[in-house]
Image (cartoon, helix red, strand yellow):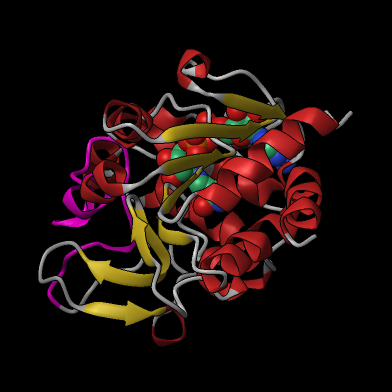
Amino acid sequence: MIDEKQITDAANIIKESNYIVVFTGAGISTESGIDDFRSEGGLWSRYDPAIYASYHYFLDDPSKFWEMNRSLEDLVANAEPNPAHYAIAELEELGKVKAIITQNVDMLHQKAGSGKYDAKIFELHGQFGTLECIKCRKEFHYEEIDTKSVKYPVCDCSGFIKPKVVLFGESLPIGVMEGAMNACRECDCFLMVGSSLVVSPANFMPSIAKQYGARILFINKESTVMDNIADIFLRGSASEIFTALMKKINT
Ligand code: NAD
């Protein structure tokens, strides 16, 4: 059940803010049909991350990673943004959102229109749409290589090919973390949507924003490990909460 008082208070904070950083996790995309990792029935209950999403394991044997990836390819390619993604794009158009820091690799923020005005999108864990040879760094699009009828794709140089997503044990894309942290230092409101906040170093962001004086809003279905720093915690479905928030903001 949506708490009207909380919606009013959060909408007022958004209206008063001029530099909002939105920080998103897998939970924002569950209503677009892409499972998160840690909720019941999520990806991790089917694919053990220590095997399927570990960079060290990938270097030894990419076939497990590709087994999981193949099951997600069409799902991610065909997924559509939901009202939460569209609301964030609208808040950018209204001049409120200046940066989107996402842990997601599904590119749904861009599909919803984010990044069209002056918001920068920081994809901390890379993105699914481009592939890369881990040896010679040549880039590919899915149409260019056969990912379906082989155990795993290999480059002409003999290097393994993988989407430009960051696996556990792999370093983050150069410069992205720094840009994201700077935005957290600048912002007057930090809005977290759909993350358990357990993955480091992504989860440094809320505390940096708090330390630099931003007001902190959380939208999530479940508690997180950092609830104590949120000024307002809006518990529930991201799309329902954003729909209620935008109604208040636009009146
Ligand atoms: P997580 O799975 O650890 O946590 C997701 C959180 O979202 C949970 O606390 C859950 O309660 C909440 N949630 C689920 N559905 C929601 C909804 N409809 N509305 C509001 N909240 C909802 O996800 P995480 O913190 O992002 O960390 C997992 C890692 O998984 C990230 O590094 C990310 O790269 C990766 N991942 C990405 C995708 C994607 O790109 N869509 C999908 C799965 C995992």
Rendered location of residue 45, percent (x, y): 62, 28
**Residue shown at the point (51%, 23%) measured from the top left:** 230
Position above or below: 81 against 206: below
Rendered location of residue 81, percent (x, y): 67, 65
In the foreground, 183 or 196: 183
In the foreground, 102 or 59: 102
Q: Is residue 185 visible?
A: yes
Q: Is residue 44 visible?
A: no
Residue 54 colored in magenta in the image: no
Q: Is residue 166 left or right of residue 115?
A: left
**Residue shown at the point (57%, 41%) measured from the top left:** 13
**Residue shown at the point (54%, 24%) measured from the top left:** 231
Work out which quarter of the rendered image holds the N terminus and state it.
top right
Rendering quarter of residue 127:
bottom left
Picture quarter with ligand 1: top right
Q: Is residue 176 left or right of residue 247?
A: left
Q: Is residue 169 left or right of residue 36?
A: left
**Residue shown at the point (55%, 34%) measured from the top left:** 217
Rendered location of residue 197, percent (x, y): 45, 27
Give the residue at the far bottom of this rendering.
144
Work out which quarter of the rendered image holds the C terminus and state it.
bottom right
Position above or below: 48 against 227: below
Number of callouts: 0
Rendered location of residue 122, percent (x, y): 33, 58
Specify start and end residues of the magenta stretch as a single range. Answer: 157-181
In the foreground, 156 or 90: 90
Position above or below: 21 against 205: below
Rendering quarter of residue 194:
top right
